[in-house]
Image (tube, grey):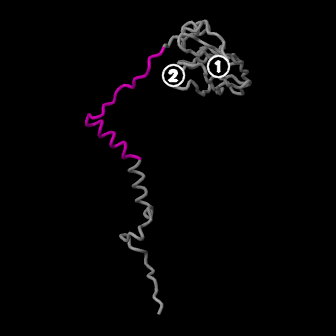
Amino acid sequence: MHRRQPTHSPRHDDPAHPPARDACPTAAARRSFLQAFGGGATLAALVGTGLLRPGRALAAEFNRAPFETRSVADVLRLIGAAGAEPSRDILLKAPEIAENGAAVPIEVVSQIPGTTRLSVMVDKNPFPLALQFTFGAGAAPRFQAKLKMGESSRLRVVATAGAMHYTVFREVKVTIGGCGE
C-alpha cells in the first residue's frame, strides 16, 4: 500500500528543514534596522559613559600663504621651489583640450626617489596653486584629481624630494572656462 506524504510544511524546530531566512518580512526589516542603527547606539553609549571622548581631529599644519598668492613666482618662492629644475621623472597626464574648465582631469606620478610633496599650479588662474599633497615615507607619490581652469593655461607640477625641487609643464586648452563663466 502506498502512504501519502503530509501536505503541511515542515516544523520550524526540525533541523533537517530550517525555515527560510527571510520567510517573515518583518524579521528582515527588523534585521536591517538593527544592522543600520545598532552601531550608532553602541557609539552613543560609549560617548555617553565617557569611555570614548570626541576630540578635535588633528590635521597636519600647512602653509596657507601659497594658496592665497596671486602670482606663480610668489607661489614658487613661498613653497621654496623658485629654482626647480625640469625632470622627465614626473608624469603629468592631462588632456590637450579640455571641453569644460570646471573639471579638468589630471593624473600625476613622481618617479623621483624620496618625493615628499607634489604641488600643482595653473599659471593663469586667479590663485595659481590649485592643490598640494604631502606624502609620508614609503607612500607612492601619485594622485588623480579634477582641476578648475578659468582659461587655457600651462599646468605646472613641482615635486619636492629632500632639499631638491623638480618640475614638469603641460599646456591645456580650455573651450569653456570653469571659474565662474
Q: Disc 2 designates what residue?
A: 135
Asked whether the beta carbons under mark 1 and mark 2 sit within 8 Å of each other, the answer is: no
Q: Nearer the viewer, residue 44 or 73?
A: 73
In primary-sequence order, the first of circles 1 and 2 is 1
Q: Nearer the viewer, residue 181 or 23?
A: 23
Could you classify mark 2 by the number of other residues whose Cα lies within 10 Å: few (under 14), some (14-19), or many (20 or more)? Answer: some
Residue 97 in the image: above or below residue 35: above
Residue at image coords 72%, 27%: 99
Q: Which residues are magenta?
A: 36-62
Q: Secondary structure at mark 1?
A: loop
Residue at image coords 68%, 22%: 177
Q: Nearer the viewer, residue 2 or 97?
A: 2
Q: Residue furthest front?
A: 113
Quadrant position of residue 173: top right
Image quarter in which the C terminus is found: top right
Residue 40 location, x and y as percent?
Answer: 36, 42
- Amino acid carrying label 2: it is Phe
Of the numbered discs in the image, which one, if any, rests on residue 9?
Answer: none
Residue 140 in the image: above or below residue 9: above
Q: Say whether residue 49 is magenta.
A: yes
Residue 69 location, x and y as percent?
Answer: 56, 10
Residue 66 location, x and y as percent?
Answer: 54, 11
- Amino acid carrying label 1: it is Asp
Of the numbered discs in the image, which one, if any, rests on residue 89?
Answer: 1
